[in-house]
Image (cartoon, rainbow, N blue to C red):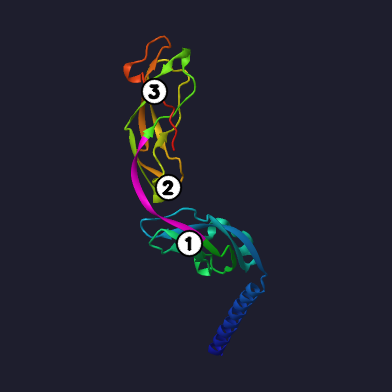
Amino acid sequence: MNERGGRSGLRLLAFVVAMVIWWIVSVEKRESVSEKVIDASVSYNSSRGIMLLDPVQSVKVRLRGPDRQIRALAPFELDVVVDVEAEEAGAVAIQLSQENVLTPPGVEVVTIEPNWLDLRLDREATTDLPVIVQLVGEPAGGAVPGEPRSTPDRARVRGPASLISGLTSVSTSPISLKGHALDFTQTVSVLSADPLVRVVEPPFVTVHVPMRSPDEPAAEEDEAPAPRRGRSQ
């Protein structure tokens, strides 16, 4: 009897466990399904030496899944990854699909807008450009600035070849003359006029600005042109 009673108890326990599992699964199946649109950021994997000129930064992704999970879903949990396999400069159209969207388990992609990306590609190029010093503001006591000198006076930049070919210089961040009546030296950053063109080296230069009083004759080296207040082109 004891052996039979033990077997009966095990059968009852197994039945209870099976019923609990069935209840949990059925509740999950009965959970309402909802949808949500998220602005997802787009990242690109491109061939070495190829740059995107105007990449699409984000797309709208409509997702479907369990209500609680969808409502709690944050944009940073979603990734849209695009592989750009082109090897040459030019235009390329890439269709997006569910395979491009990395989602949490249990969430499916319904639609992507736009689902086609029209991209322009260019070869990456590197060159050295002269550094133009930007002077702003008025010196103290009517002092007159001489020709500023940057050390080093050239910087290496990298970016799309079509943009690099149109650049003639890079500039320093603005150097204020306000309050200065005597020669001074300042370390400033080097700036590119285009966000797609990056200053590789040096990121900073040291600029020496000579100053003279208004009644002091200009030094021979400063006689020709007035000091330039440089602009990046």
| Residue 81 badge | 1
Query: Magenta stretch containing residue 116, yes or no?
Result: no
| Residue 225 badge | 3
Q: Is residue 143 left or right of residue 2?
A: left
Q: Residues within 10 Å of mark 3 (few under 14, many from 20)?
A: few
Label located before the other in sequence (1 or 2): 1
The quarter holding residue 12 reads bottom right
| Residue, disc 2 | 163
- Dot 1 amino acid type: Val
Q: What percent of the width, then of the height, locates residue 110?
A: 60, 69
Total marks in image:
3
Which mark lies nearer to you, 1 or 2?
2
Q: What percent of the width, then of the height, locates residue 212?
A: 39, 14
For numbered disc 3, what is the local secondary structure? loop
- Dot 2 amino acid type: Leu
Magenta-drawn segment: 118-130
Q: What percent of the width, then of the height, locates residue 39?
A: 59, 57
Label located before the other in sequence (3 or 2): 2
